[in-house]
Image: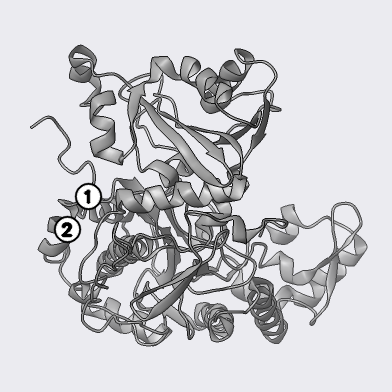
């Protein structure tokens, strides 16, 4: 959290409590669940019901019927909420000009375009080359303009329909102007501002040798207007994004439901002899089938030795009887990312060694889940999961004991735990798959818990330095290492912090018995179409976009 912000100066963004789904979300400036639930008159949208069996689901029984996944309905983020977000940002920066820069068009129109998340968070606008100017004084928005591509029927023949400056207000609630007028308008905003400060929003990196598209455009603009003091303000936007609004939480429930459905499809299909890319194709078909615009990140479908590679995404190996496979996937729905990982046996039955590693990882996840509630530091979850993993690895014989170390590349002593668990426990989710989140949990925070154990076959031949100390370690754990070599397990779930605890929003089978029982059913794939999910997509911005 940023320090030194006088929250009483938050004019236009009241300190208030929003209640939706029985989840009280404190909307104080700087830690806001913004007013997606607020109408212009201050009334609340009714909280939509969850799908049958899904209401405030605490970690427990899994769901195996796709018809029971997800919310009972989902709606887009309203223009009123986007305006509240900009008002909250103004309260944080207090004075000056805010310059938020959208992402530029790709060099070729057939290359996919995705809006950068800070700009999308403030505007909801997803066309290329856009920019937002805000004039701020005393923590209030005095003026704001959205700069967009002009209408061009000839270019739209190649690139698709544009809203144009005249359509910007209807689309976003913000006055529109052609993007070619940005430089002149920037000067006008500076002249009208009592402060020379410019707060830049977006991936602006002026000190890097290789400048991205946003950096080039911002730097060019600043060079035309000497004497201004420009500073990045992404930290302020990140602070606002740490706690999600009711509308955002529903979108996250939706994207995790789509991703959960893809996991069920994968678990119903997998068999020895298939290639990893076949599962990837099925997964990403399920994403697109329900309105996901793309995977939120490169799908990870790693079997056998590939299960020990954390971010493996080549997805091109023929799976063998006796393998486990790590499937780490996430849909992006209206920009909101899911991130769910399951590790399953390719033949439907875990071996004894696989089961032992799997159960240790699941125990670590359960231990962290049990602590997760408002007021608990994220570091406490990390510590508890690491404790369970370290004690379990010692019990299995993969490390010499709790607190044991090995000799790192520089001669430093490194915990042996890090030989098999080398990443953090979780992260926030939202418009980015690794979204901003606070250091202490509070209602409205959406995040993952994802412990893992990876027994890399080449650990002692290529990874660990060849020193007398490490050779002694290899001798001590050699029998256990041979038993578990080539087994990688990661279990990752998505959660929302509620007033009283935790809501589990990715209820795919994850206990050993649940996985084996579900895979034994070999349900037909694809599952019956969720007509309601496709119909909900009709209400989303850009659905069926075009002049007609």
Which coloring applies here?
A: one colour
Q: Residues within 10 Å of mark 1 (few under 14, many from 20)?
A: some
- Determine whether, in the image, residue 463 is placed left or right of residue 43: right
Instruction: Quickly name the residue at label 2.
Output: 536
How many marks overall? 2
Q: Which mark is residue 540?
A: 1
Which quarter of the rendering shows the N terminus?
bottom right
CB contact under 8 Å: marks 1 and 2: yes
Which quarter of the rendering shows the C terminus?
top left
- Determine whether, in the image, residue 131 is placed left or right of residue 309: left
Q: Residue at x 84, y 66 (%)?
A: 406
- Determine whether, in the image, residue 282 is placed left or right of residue 443: left
Secondary element at image label 2: helix
Residue 450: percent from left, percent from top: 54, 69
Residue 9: percent from left, percent from top: 60, 55
Nearest to the observer: residue 466 or residue 227: 227
Residue 211: percent from left, percent from top: 61, 24
C-alpha span from label 1 to label 2: 7 Å
The picture quadrant where one finds residue 300 is: bottom left
Q: Hey, which residue is sitting farthest left in the picture?
A: 548
Residue 273: percent from left, percent from top: 32, 59
Specify whether residue 333 is in view: no
Specify whether residue 91 is in view: yes
């Amino acid at each position: 959290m940023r320090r030194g912000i006088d929250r009483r100066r938050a004019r236009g963004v009241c300190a208030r409590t929003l209640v939706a789904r029985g989840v009280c979300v404190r909307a104080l400036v700087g830690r806001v669940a913004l007013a997606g639930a607020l109408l212009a008159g201050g009334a609340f949208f009714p909280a939509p019901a969850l799908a049958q069996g899904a209401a405030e689901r605490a970690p427990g029984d899994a769901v195996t019927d796709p018809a029971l996944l997800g919310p009972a309905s989902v709606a887009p983020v309203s223009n009123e909420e986007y305006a509240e977000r900009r008002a909250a940002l103004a309260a944080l920066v207090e004075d000056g000009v805010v310059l938020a820069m959208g992402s530029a068009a790709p060099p070729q129109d057939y290359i996919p375009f995705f809006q950068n998340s800070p700009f999308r968070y403030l505007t909801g606008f997803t066309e290329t080359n856009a920019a937002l100017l805000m004039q701020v004084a005393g923590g209030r928005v005095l003026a704001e303009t959205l700069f967009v591509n002009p209408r061009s029927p000839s270019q739209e023949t190649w690139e698709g329909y544009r809203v144009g400056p005249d359509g910007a207000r209807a689309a976003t609630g913000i006055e529109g102007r052609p993007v070619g007028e940005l430089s002149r308008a920037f000067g006008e905003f500076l002249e009208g501002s009592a402060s020379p400060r410019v707060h830049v929003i977006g991936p602006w990196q002026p000190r890097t040798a290789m400048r991205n598209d946003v950096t080039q455009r911002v730097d060019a603009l600043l060079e035309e207007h000497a004497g201004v003091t420009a500073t990045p303000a992404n930290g302020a936007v990140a602070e606002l994004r740490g706690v999600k609004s009711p509308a955002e939480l529903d979108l996250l429930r939706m994207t995790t439901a789509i991703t959960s459905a893809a996991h069920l499809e994968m678990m119903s299909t997998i068999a020895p002899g298939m290639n990893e890319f076949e599962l990837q194709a099925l997964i990403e078909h399920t994403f697109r089938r329900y309105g996901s615009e793309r995977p939120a990140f490169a799908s990870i479908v790693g079997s056998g030795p590939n299960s020990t590679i954390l971010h493996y995404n080549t997805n091109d190996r023929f799976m063998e009887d006796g393998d486990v496979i790590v499937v780490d996937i996430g849909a992006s729905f209206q920009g909101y990312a899911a991130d769910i990982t399951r590790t399953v046996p390719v033949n439907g039955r875990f071996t004894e060694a696989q089961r032992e590693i799997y159960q240790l990882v699941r125990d670590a996840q359960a231990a962290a889940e049990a602590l997760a509630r408002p007021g608990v530091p994220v570091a406490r979850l990390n510590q508890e999961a690491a404790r369970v993993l370290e004690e379990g690895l010692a019990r299995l014989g993969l490390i010499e004991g709790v607190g044991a170390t090995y000799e790192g590349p520089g001669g430093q002593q490194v915990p042996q735990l890090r030989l098999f668990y080398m990443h953090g426990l979780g992260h926030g989710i939202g418009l980015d798959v690794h979204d901003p989140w606070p250091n202490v949990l509070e209602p409205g925070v959406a995040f993952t818990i994802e412990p893992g154990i990876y027994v890399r076959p080449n650990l002692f031949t290529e990874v660990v330095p060849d020193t007398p100390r490490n050779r002694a370690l290899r001798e001590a754990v050699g029998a256990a290492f041979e038993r578990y070599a080539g087994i990688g397990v990661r279990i990752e779930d998505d959660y929302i912090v509620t007033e009283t605890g935790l809501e589990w929003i990715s209820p795919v089978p994850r206990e050993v018995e649940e996985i084996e029982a579900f895979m034994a059913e070999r349900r037909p794939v694809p599952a019956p179409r969720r007509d309601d999910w496709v119909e909900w997509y009709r209400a989303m911005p850009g659905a069926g976009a075009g002049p007609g």
